[in-house]
Image: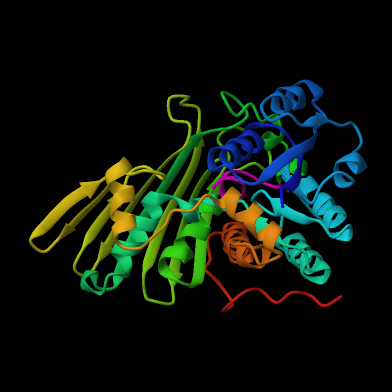
């Protein structure tokens, strides 16, 4: 079946998902888009043949699944509306402006029994998949230390032009929640569960409630220790860049681009690097496929099967984010994390 999709929001991230669907040749049709900015919605629609609609209900009535790509504070309401109609939902990260609201959203989609997925797309990055493969190799030994730097110019300007990210009532907070929730998700994806976290935050741009510099220290059940640096600066030549350095007992790995590398390694009597097509070929040779997460969502909707990563999976990153913010509010004191997913409140 051709899955009929509707989009709430038509900005940069919505356009990314539209393009990924088209790149994959997914058996889907984007039939409706709603955005308060009608001009932007029209540009989005021109690229896929969708109809721009003024009423939200006109989107829900026309589709099998929706993409929620609005500012963060709108996510819970739109997800609840989709779930109430039995529609599958793809929600951009972060799910919500705080952990309790994210928990409530998990309740909503699980109670409705709808297919649900979160835009934690870097789990499908070829570079991070290769890094995970190298870390998981027993010959590397245990991970001892990770230095993870994530920097981006503050996205109220430039190609992002996202003024709502400077509004805490819409974004919730700044670089940690809005951007580095990807990083926190990736760290548990790579290393397993975290057990405690501490952090400090700062506001250099003077936007109250929108932190633009974060340093966090995270301890993992495996014994690994991680230092995460997240910063929003004003250097427009650096739109979004990650560098990850991993020290294992018998190996050293460096990831320098978060999609196609290069990924470098140094092991006893062995050093090298892979990027681009050669990196993807190495994944294929090891039976690792870098999937298109948007095509995977469409396939899950068509089959009525579970999507990945779903809302429940995304809660761990929200739990880590909440712990770091709580630590920063108390002067950097460590916060212990519960094992597994947070307990979802019963209705």
x then y, percent, for residue 260: 37, 43
Magenta-tinted stretch: 172-179
Comparing 9 with 49, the one in front is 49
Comparing 199 with 303, the one in front is 303
Kindly identify the residue that appears in the image at 57 percent across and 63 percent down. 320
| Up/down of 222 relative to 309, above or below | below
| Up/down of 174 relative to 216, above or below | above
x then y, percent, for residue 252: 22, 59
How many numbered circles does the render carry?
Answer: 0
Residue found at the far front of this picture:
1
> Looking at the rendering, which quadrant does residue 242 occupy?
top left
x then y, percent, for residue 37: 79, 26
Q: Report whether 341 appears left or right of 59.
A: left
x then y, percent, for residue 264: 24, 50
Comparing 75 with 118, the one in front is 118
Q: Report whether 62 appears left or right of 133.
A: right
Q: Report whether 67 appears left or right of 278.
A: right
Res. 248 in view: yes
Q: Report whether 71 appears left or right of 22.
A: right
| Up/down of 36 relative to 128, above or below | above
Kindly identify the residue that appears in the image at 14 percent across and 54 percent down. 271
């Amino acid at each position: 079946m051709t899955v009929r999709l509707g989009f709430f929001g038509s900005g940069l991230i919505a356009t990314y998902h539209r393009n990924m669907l088209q790149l994959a040749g997914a058996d889907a049709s984007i039939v409706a888009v709603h955005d308060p900015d009608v001009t932007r919605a029209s540009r989005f629609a021109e690229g896929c043949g969708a109809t721009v609609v003024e009423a939200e209900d006109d989107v829900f009535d026309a589709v099998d699944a929706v993409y929620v790509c609005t500012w963060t504070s709108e996510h819970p309401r739109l997800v609840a509306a989709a779930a109430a109609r039995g529609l599958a939902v793809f929600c951009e990260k972060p799910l919500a402006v705080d952990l309790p609201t994210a928990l409530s959203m998990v309740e909503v989609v699980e109670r409705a029994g709808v297919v649900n997925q979160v835009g934690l797309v870097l789990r499908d990055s070829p570079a991070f998949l290769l890094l995970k493969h190298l870390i998981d190799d027993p010959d590397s030994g245990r991970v001892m230390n990770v230095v993870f730097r994530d920097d981006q110019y503050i996205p109220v300007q430039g190609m992002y032009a996202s003024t709502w990210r400077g509004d805490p009532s819409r974004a919730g907070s700044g670089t940690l929640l809005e951007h580095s929730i990807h990083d926190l998700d990736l760290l548990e994806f790579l290393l397993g569960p975290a057990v405690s976290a501490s952090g400090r935050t700062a506001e250099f741009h003077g936007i109250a409630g929108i932190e633009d510099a974060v340093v966090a220290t995270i301890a993992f059940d495996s014994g690994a220790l991680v230092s995460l640096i997240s910063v929003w600066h004003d250097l427009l030549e650096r739109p979004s860049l990650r560098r990850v350095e991993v020290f294992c007992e018998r190996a050293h790995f460096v990831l320098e681009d978060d999609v196609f590398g290069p990924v470098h390694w140094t092991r006893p009597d062995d050093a090298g690097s892979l990027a681009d097509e050669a990196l993807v070929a190495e994944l294929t040779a090891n039976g690792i496929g870098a999937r298109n997460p948007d095509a995977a969502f469409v396939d899950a909707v068509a089959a009525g099967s579970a999507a990945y990563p779903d809302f429940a999976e995304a809660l761990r990153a929200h739990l880590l984010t909440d712990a770091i913010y709580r630590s920063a509010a108390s002067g950097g004191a460590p916060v212990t994390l519960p094992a597994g997913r947070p307990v979802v409140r019963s209705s």
